[in-house]
Amino acid sequence: MSMPFYVAPEQFMKDKADFARKNIARGRPLIATTYADGILICAENTSKTLHKVSEIYDRIAFAGVGRYNEFDQLRRSGVQYADVKGFQFSREDVDARSLANLYAQHIGNVFTHEMKPLEVEILVAEVGVETGSDQIFHILYDGSVVDEDRFSVLGGEAEAITTRMAQTFKVGWSLTDALKAATAALGGPDQVLAVPDLEVALLIRTESRRAFRRIEDAETAELLGLPAAAAEVVVDGGQSKPGAGGELADLPEAGAGDTPA
């Protein structure tokens, strides 16, 4: 007669946490940081169709790292929640704090009660009307919420990137300085990220209603002080093609991190 299989609850939860952390760390990182006119979100992402950063509502953005299909499902549910709440009450009642709490509750319930946790970390950011009123919430794989007041780093090598970003961060810096610092922090001392490998989006304080704006490669190159050619990649045959090497060329192995990584 075989003995029943038993795992201590503490060990089971530790194994789930280790599983989630390991797979999230394989995803390519992103940084969200405040700047003079709003919030900048800069991610390493070679895909031009599978976005890691998206708009949720008027002044709220969503970003995620980890398994793409899981954090994109969270994004869609967030959009639906915001639309319904804004319709039933008022647009001003939709805020990042309540959305972050909703995400934290769902992700925490999955981590506690399901066999496999969500392999994601997500970020909810809201640009305030006044300087100093911006909100950045980092929700971890177990439902923990971290309220950031300067910048937040998600994904692989988060500790090292946080250290590099902290060394250069300045309160009220310009968009150009913030983007250069975020790009340098993501790349590190041994790597320079090409413009087509970046996904850049803004929440702009001065916009009256919809604050979210996606930055295209040409504008990213201009902000970084690079020639326009930096927004293109040379592919086979010597032809230049913006954003070459998209999601099909960058799919990870089964069980790896986010699809656009």
Image (cartoon, rainbow, N blue to C red):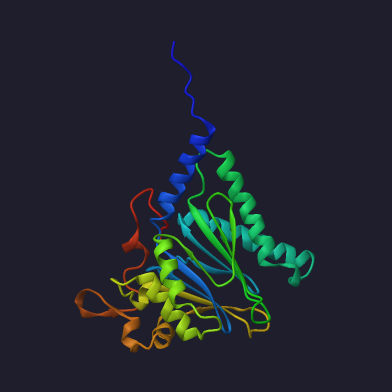
- What residue lies at 51% left-to-right and 49% top-to-bottom? 118
Q: Quadrant of the C terminus?
A: bottom left
Vertical relation: 6 (above or below) 200: above
On the image, the x and y values in percent for residue 232 come to: 32, 80
Q: Nearer the viewer, residue 48 or 205?
A: 205
On the image, the x and y values in percent for residue 240 come to: 28, 80
Q: Quadrant of the N terminus?
A: top left
- What residue lies at 45% left-to-right and 80% top-to-bottom? 179
On the image, the x and y values in percent for residue 219 come to: 43, 85
Q: Nearer the viewer, residue 22 or 203?
A: 22
Vertical relation: 223 (above or below) 200: below
- The image quadrant that residue 160 belongs to is bottom left
Q: Residue furthest left?
A: 237
Q: Nearer the viewer, residue 102 or 218?
A: 102
On the image, the x and y values in percent for residue 66 come to: 45, 56
- The image quadrant that residue 80 belongs to is bottom right
- The image quadrant that residue 88 belongs to is bottom right
